[in-house]
Structures are given as C-alpha cells and as structure tokens.
Amino acid sequence: MQVIVLGGIARVGKTEVADILEMEAAMLGKNPKRISFSTPLKQACAEKHGYKDPRKFKDEMPEVYRKECQELGAGKREENEDHWVNLWLEMVMDEQRKETEQPVVDGDWKEPVIICDDCRYHNELNAVKQFEAIRLFIFKGKREVDEADAAWRSHESEWLAQKVEGGDPDYESLFNWAIVNDQSVD
C-alpha cells in the first residue's frame, strides 16, 4: 500500500492535485482511494444530521455543515488532539487489512494508493510516517490565491502550511516532495 499526503495553504490546489494523482494511479493499474484527515469528521457531522453522504449534507445545508464541522472538529481536538488522526488511522489500517485479502485476478493485483489531500497538523504528519508516506507540499509560488472570505487564513489549521510556504527553516523537512502551483493544470 502506498500513502500520499498533500499539504499547503487553503485554496492552493491540493484537491486538484489529489484528483490528478487518483486518475494517474488508476491508469497505472493501482487501486486509488481518497481518505482525507477530515473524512471521519465529515462523516460524523453528516450522520449527526441524518445524512449518510457528507457531500449531500454539505450541498443541502452548507452553512450548518461548515459550522458543525468547525465546532465538532475543534471540540474533539481540544479533548484529544489525536481524535481525528486516530479515526483516520483506523480507516487506513482497515484498507491495509483489505489489501491482504484482495484477490489476484488473472495474475493481476492492484496496489492500494491512499490519497489524503488535507495534511494540516504536526500530528497528522507524524501519523503518516508509519506508512512511509510520500509527503507532498503544494506551494503557491507567484500565483495569487483567492482571498475571498480570508478570515479562515488565521485559523490554526493554516499555521503549519503558512510556515512551510514562508520558508521557515524549522519546517522545511516536514514534506519530502514539493510542487509549485503557479501554472495552469496542463
């Protein structure tokens, strides 16, 4: 199993890069699966409001969804900073167990590739080390990042990315690969 985690400031293109990685992995005959650190949080919020699919909850009640995710996320992190990381680890380890049970069809085995597009905290980076994860940071370079509703830039979930983006030497070794996203998708 391969694990790839993406970090970077909000709206820098992490999800778009994850989409490309997912597509490329599938084209290479791998079995890609998106498991973000926020996946357990989004599922918990959706279930609390009677939704099975977090995307449907987000689409139908975007303001409630955002507020609920922020409050529940912060509340559980305050009780135990590893709460969401531990739930993410359970999901990834479940995929790792499934890998050993995966049938080989006509001599073909599809390696699982877990793609996580929202690595924002030190404890998340520490958690992925047990999988020898590829840690990829997306820099904005000269590109202007949409600053609409920029109040969230001061949220604690942005601090690590801002330190890396700003070139803080204490943060430069946290990620082992980098992309400067200041060009078109092509």
Image (cartoon, helix red, strand yellow):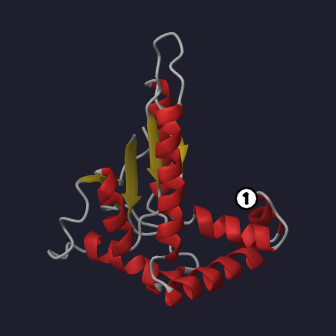
x, y percent for residue 29 = 47, 24
Q: Is residue 112 left or right of residue 49?
A: left
Q: Is residue 163 above or below residue 177?
A: below
Q: Is residue 40 left or right of residue 147?
A: right
Q: In this view, does 27 lie above or below 44?
A: above
Residue drawn at (43%, 25%), measured in percent from left and top?
28
x, y percent for residue 185 = 44, 43
Quarter of the image where the C terminus is located: top left
Query: Which residue is the extreme one toward the left?
Result: 169
Q: Is residue 79 left or right of residue 176?
A: right
Q: Nearer the viewer, residue 53 or 92?
A: 92
Q: Is residue 19 visible?
A: no
Quarter of the image where the N terminus is located: top left
Question: Which amino acid, mark 1?
Answer: Arg
Secondary structure at badge 1 equals helix
Q: Can residue 72 be seen in this view?
A: yes
Query: Which residue is the extreme one toward the top?
Result: 106
x, y percent for residue 78 = 51, 89
Q: Nearer the viewer, residue 86 or 133?
A: 86
Badge 1 local density, few (<14 within 10 Å), some, or many (20+)?
some
Q: Mark 1 points at which residue?
A: 55
Q: Which of 74 and 159 is in front in this view?
A: 74
Residue drawn at (27%, 54%), measured in percent from left and top?
178
Residue drawn at (64%, 85%), measured in percent from left and top?
71
Q: In this view, does 107 lie above or below 76?
A: above
